[in-house]
Image: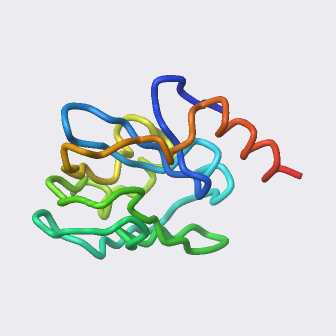
Amino acid sequence: MKILPDLFYTATHEWVKLENQKITIGITDFAQNELSDIVFLEYHVSEGDLVKKGDSICTVEAVKTAEDIFSPVEGKIVKINSSLPDNPSLLNKEPYEGGWIAVIEISPDFSPAYLLSSDDYKTVVIESAH
């Protein structure tokens, strides 16, 4: 299972990449593995929408279950991955690359202090596996 050291994470298994007042989010390798074969993705937001921390961005449906993916931050959706609705299996194949879900513009005073480091996320995964 891949947990990249240069990313932040949430306890609900989203990854967060911080770059120049924007974050890119997706689901972790652990999450895509737990969901199994992802067959459907529906966005609940559009580019330009404002989201709050905890708002649902999309629903991901797998063979076994469906899960909402939540915004880990407050901000403005500046880009969504328009290829995912037509090719949701990218979330399984490339969770950290082609399977990114959205880019959110954050406020200048944003602090990632409440997000998890890769080491902290490893602990969450180990506890989730038991």
Q: Which quadrant of the figure has residue 97?
A: top left
Residue at the farthest left position: 48
41 on left or right of 85: right
Give the residue at x 34% y 39%.
Answer: 98
**Residue toward you, 46 or 22:** 22
46 on left or right of 61: left
Q: Is residue 37 above or below residue 46?
A: above
**Residue toward you, 11 or 33:** 11
Residue at the farthest top position: 5
Give the residue at x 65% y 40%.
Answer: 121
Q: Is residue 57 above or below residue 19?
A: below
Q: Which quadrant of the figure has residue 122?
A: top right
Q: How far from the left and from the top, in percent, is residue 77?
A: 19, 59
Q: Is residue 55 above or below residue 99?
A: below
Image quarter of the N terminus: top right
Q: How far from the left and from the top, in percent, is residue 24?
A: 31, 43
Give the residue at x 46% y 24%.
Answer: 6
